Structures are given as C-alpha cells and as structure tokens.
Image (cartoon, rainbow, N blue to C red):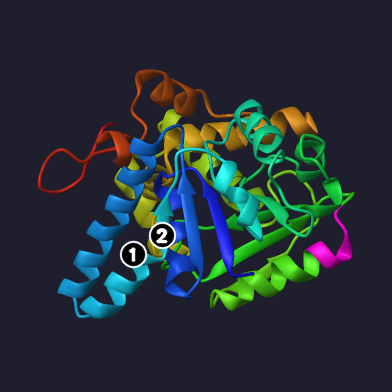
C-alpha cells in the first residue's frame, strides 16, 4: 500500500495522515470541502513546527512529509488509493453515507477501512461496495504518538483483507491488537465503562474531580485520571461510544451516566471546547465541579 486516502481532516484524520506520510506514503486528505482539508494540512504543519522546535524532526524531513500530503476536494482522486480510511465523526449515518459515496471510486484491489472506535464493522460493511474488502482500523489519539492500532474484521471480511491491513498497520511502526467485531472492540470496551463509572462516582458525590483522577493515577498507576482522559477524548465521543455499547448490547451496565449527558448537552465537551470536567481557559486546568 503506497497511496492512502483519509476522509476526515479533524484531529484523528490529520493524525492518521501525518503518520502515514511520515512512513513515506502518499496521502490524499479530504473533508466536507477543500477548505477544511487544507486546514487539516495546516494543522499538521503546525504540529511539525512544534516538533522541530523540540528537536524531534529536521526541517527537511518535515518539508518532505508535508509534500506527501495532498488536500483534495472530493472522492474522485481516491480511485488511485490502495486504502481508503474513514475518520469522520462517530455517527453511523454519516459514516454510512461516506462509505457509499467513496465506494463508487474504490478500485478493485483497494481496501476500505473505518477508524470507528465502537460501531459494528459488519453492519457498516453493508454500505460499502464489497464487504469482503471492508475492515475496522482503529487508531488511538494522538495518532503520531500512540503505539497501538486495533484491526477489526467484520463477519464478511476476507482473510486476505485482514492480513493486508495488519501488515499495513505494522508498517506504520505500530503494534496491532486483532479484535473480533464486538461492541467497543477491546480497548474501548474496557476503557469507556471505566470513564462512565468515574462520572457516576462524581455525579453521586462520592468524590470530587481531582480526587477521582488522583485516585486512579496513583492507585491504578494510570498516566491520566479517567475524567482528565475523558476531556482529552471529548465528552461527546465518550457519550457516543457508551450509546453504541448500550444500544448494541441492550445491557444496562452500559447506560451513560446522567452527568455525562448533562455536560454534553451544555456543550462542555472537554479540551476541544475549553471546558469539560476541567476548565482550560486559564493558565492551569480547574475542576468545573
């Protein structure tokens, strides 16, 4: 796989594009319009400037990496892609529309992958032109830093598709976890209920935000507390995943914490909005409860 197409120029899509280009691959990056795709490339350039300032990358290497990323206005150029990676928002109806449209240009040997963090692969594959060449490819945020990718074949995914996708993921310098197509896959099936339970603990006033996070950092040896991590992931994304887990399994243990719903309704989505369980508008984060 030498030519990669990425749909979605947000935080995940740009991270995937940067990682692929950093391994010498050509990347086409698109979003709802060319302006957003170009803004995504600009965000990658900004990230590379920071890395240069820390001595993590040379200027020539950064320039070469950027040159391998091409913002495009629509899916037509994806006819040349060996792999199309969808990295849009975690809403199934949006993803399905993308698969149907991008599937019109998917060439006969190419693979279509979704970066979904929870939505069933088998179900979404029905909206692609060939479910045998459809697979889950779940990167973790921030993509250039995190060393893991989950590979998730659906019921109809061909073994050759799984093998090629796994080889691709490893070629990016990542470790691979192979998961069956179960709700939340491996990592989020474990992580999101923990975050959700931390919100229940907060909502029931068992402990405050800082004590909950401190308890998990020191008591569980986690690098981040669950509420701090939720802010980093995005509270809307956390809620979307919990809703997928609940609606897919109908198991009440995946019911979203009411306080999580309330924060999302308030638009307090975490770092990306400047306020979640912590307020990030000042010099240091301050708990919002």
**How many neighbours does mark 2 have within 10 angstroms: few (below 14), some (14-19), or many (20 or more)?**
many
Which residue is nearer to you in this view: 94 or 187? 94
- Label of residue 69 in the image: 2
Along the horizontal axis of the image, is 183 left or right of 65?
A: right
The image position of residue 146, as x and y in percent, is 47, 67
Which segment did they paint magenta? 157-161
- Residue 94 in the magenta stretch? The answer is no
Q: Are marks 2 and 1 in contact (CB under 8 Å)?
A: yes
67 over 102 or under it: above or below: below
- Label of residue 66 in the image: 1
Determine if residue 86 is in view. no
Q: Residue at x 33, y 41 (%)?
A: 209
User: Label 2's element?
Assistant: strand
Which residue is nearer to you in this view: 259 or 90? 90
The image position of residue 17, as x and y in percent, is 46, 59
Q: Residue furthest left?
A: 283
The image position of residue 80, as x and y in percent, is 62, 56
Q: Residue at x 78, y 28 (%)?
A: 250
Which image quadrant for residue 255?
top right
The majority secondary structure of the magenta stretch comes to helix
Q: Residue at x 88, y 59 (%)?
A: 158
Which image quadrant for residue 94?
top right
The Cα–Cα distance between marks 2 and 1, rounded to whole angstroms, is: 5 Å
Determine if residue 164 is in view. yes
- Label of residue 264 in the image: none
User: Label 1's element?
Assistant: helix
How many numbered discs sit on the rendered protein? Answer: 2
**How many neighbours does mark 1 have within 10 angstroms: few (below 14), some (14-19), or many (20 or more)?**
many
Along the horizontal axis of the image, is 8 left or right of 113?
A: left
Which residue is nearer to you in this view: 15 or 147? 15
């Amino acid at each position: 796989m030498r030519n990669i197409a990425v749909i979605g120029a947000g935080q995940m899509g740009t991270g995937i594009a940067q990682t692929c280009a950093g391994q010498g691959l050509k990347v086409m990056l698109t979003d709802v319009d060319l302006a957003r795709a170009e803004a995504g490339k600009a965000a990658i350039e900004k990230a590379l400037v920071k890395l240069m300032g820390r001595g993590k990358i040379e200027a020539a290497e950064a320039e070469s990496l950027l040159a391998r990323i091409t913002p495009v206005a629509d899916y037509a150029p994806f006819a040349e892609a060996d792999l199309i990676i969808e990295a849009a928002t975690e809403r199934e109806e949006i993803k399905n529309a993308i698969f149907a449209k991008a599937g019109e240009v998917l060439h006969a040997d190419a693979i279509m992958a979704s970066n979904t963090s929870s939505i069933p692969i088998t179900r979404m594959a029905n909206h692609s032109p060939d479910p045998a060449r459809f697979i889950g490819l779940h990167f973790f945020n921030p993509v250039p830093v995190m060393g893991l990718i989950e590979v998730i074949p659906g019921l109809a995914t061909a073994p050759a598709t799984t093998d090629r996708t796994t080889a691709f993921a490893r070629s990016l310098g990542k470790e691979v976890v192979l998961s069956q197509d179960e709700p939340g896959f491996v990592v989020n099936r474990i992580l999101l209920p923990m975050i959700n339970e931390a919100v229940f603990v907060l909502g029931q006033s068992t402990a405050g935000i800082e004590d909950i996070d401190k308890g998990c950092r020191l008591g569980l040896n986690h690098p981040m507390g669950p509420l701090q991590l939720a802010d980093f992931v995005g509270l809307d994304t956390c809620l979307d995943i919990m809703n997928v887990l609940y609606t897919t399994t109908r198991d009440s243990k995946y019911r979203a914490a009411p306080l999580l719903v309330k924060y999302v309704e308030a638009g307090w989505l975490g770092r990306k909005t400047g306020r979640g369980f912590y307020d990030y508008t000042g010099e240091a984060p301050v708990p919002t409860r």
